[in-house]
Amino acid sequence: MKKLQLLAVASEIFPLIKTGGLADVVGALPAALAHEDVKVRTVVPGYPSVMAALPKGKALRTFAEFFGGPAQLIAGKAAGLDILALDAPHLFGRPGNPYSGPDGRDWPDNWRRFAALSRITADIAMGALPGYRPDVVHAHDWQTGLTFAYMHFAGGRRPGTVMTIHNLAFQGQFSPDLFPLLGLPPEALGTDGVEYYGAIGYLKAGLHYADRITTVSPCYAAEIRTPEEGMGLDGLIRGRSGVMSGILNGIDVDEWNPETDRHLAAKFSATDVAPRALNKSALQSFLGLDQDATAPLFGIVTRLTWQKGLDLLLANVPNLLSQGAQLAVLGTGEPGIEGGFRAAAAANPGRIGCVIGYDEGLAHRVLAGSDAVLVPSRFEPCGLTQLYGLRYGAIPVVARVGGLSDTVIDANPAALGAGVATGLQFAPVTYEMMRVALERSIGLYRQPDIWNQLRANGMASDVSWRDPARRYAAMFREIAPAD
């Protein structure tokens, strides 16, 4: 079988730069696809952390002016990844969050920053690097959406193209006044192009011009075809449903492996789960929680936002505590929800531990030490936290939406009787139904035989990239140009 050359492009990639699950996916796919004879090079912005990881990078192209300033295309290897970094300090040489400034607001020139990322990727795809011509280009989320518009209007033979939606809520919409600065021909600004309800739509462009569209779970692929979940793009998505599919995410099972995880107080496995109790004790100690091995400890590792249903969890804190449970919170997000958890922790010392921010090592410890992990999202394209929970023996308690419904088997009587349940689901996503789910969870926790079986089932689940990588590779080969 011929080795396929895949050019990926994304705005973040683990472990070089991460704000969420997108980075984990982009960072893990290359190694998984290598087993399918797919070689991946990934184009990313040259943020400070990316350039620091490429001290021996080689300049492949130099630009005196590229979207407002000098730039270089740097090739190098970092963390086992084959990276092409757009080193443009005027665009990406900014510390902190890659999308927003210290005030939390989006950088006003994000339109320019990610148009530049898309343009350099399109140029590479169309042969700008001597001796390199990818078979397929795989673009992730709105920040890369213009890539396929640039490729379309370049003309000539081009690679196959795939656009993956990680979260339809983020679409990259900008003023049409900026269009002359993008370097696209006038005919691109139309409903049959990049125009979107009078604005320039970066994600819309990617969805319109891509050969194939994927989302990160089958259920989410179905949900976004509806007006309720389509975020204004449902018409376009329905029109392109014939080239759309849902492929579940996996996780990096080497990075997330309780048998080897350097972050943990005690390593454990599916066949030797007893040391896991030491991780619960260590997490309780770190967060100032009461040292109570019998208290059900619920973990949260997520963005603290309305989308994630965290306002409903805040409302349910009294119900949780009244049943003797504890809560471990790690995340950052909307100020009101952050403040709510800070206040809840201050009012309930020993019962609620809260860390506002993100710490990769602490995320591992929360998953290894919690009895259950809560993912009560109002919508969730796939979700990775529940997959980490399955892997680490933290039983997922999730809303029945998107990828959560595709990856967690509810502990209903039929599933318990068949011995296949791996967690708990609830729907609709309301205060009352979450309260019921928490009560169910604690009730099952008080039945060790059932709880231990749930944990064993979850830890036996295949949450790796093996099957998703096969599906991606098969799709890439279908759309690659014939030699």
Image (cartoon, grey):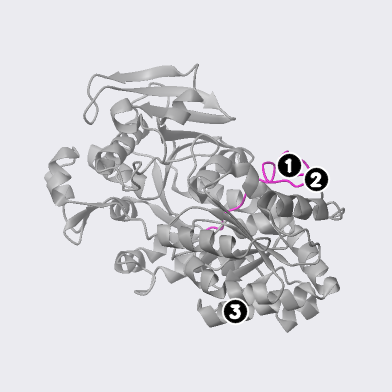
Q: Which residue is mark 2?
A: 267
x, y percent for residue 151: 29, 40
Vertical position of residue 456 compared to residue 154: above or below: below
Secondary structure that dominates the magenta span: loop
The answer to which of marks 3 and 1 sits earlier in the sequence is: 1
Determine whether 147 is above or below 353 in the image. above
Are discs 3 and 1 less than 8 Å apart at CB? no
Contact flag, marks 2 and 1 (Cβ < 8 Å):
yes
Q: Nearer the viewer, residue 423 or 105?
A: 105
Q: Which part of the image, by quadrant, shows the C terminus?
A: top left
Image quadrant assignment for residue 171: bottom left
**How many C-alpha atoms fall within 10 Å of the one at disc 1: few (<14), some, or many (≥20)?**
some
Q: Secondary structure at mark 2?
A: loop
Tell me if residue 382 can be seen.
no
Question: Residue at horizontal 51%, vertical 25%?
Answer: 53
Q: Which residue is mark 1?
A: 261
Residue 324 lies, with reference to residue 55, above or below; the image says below
Front residue (pair 82, 421): 421
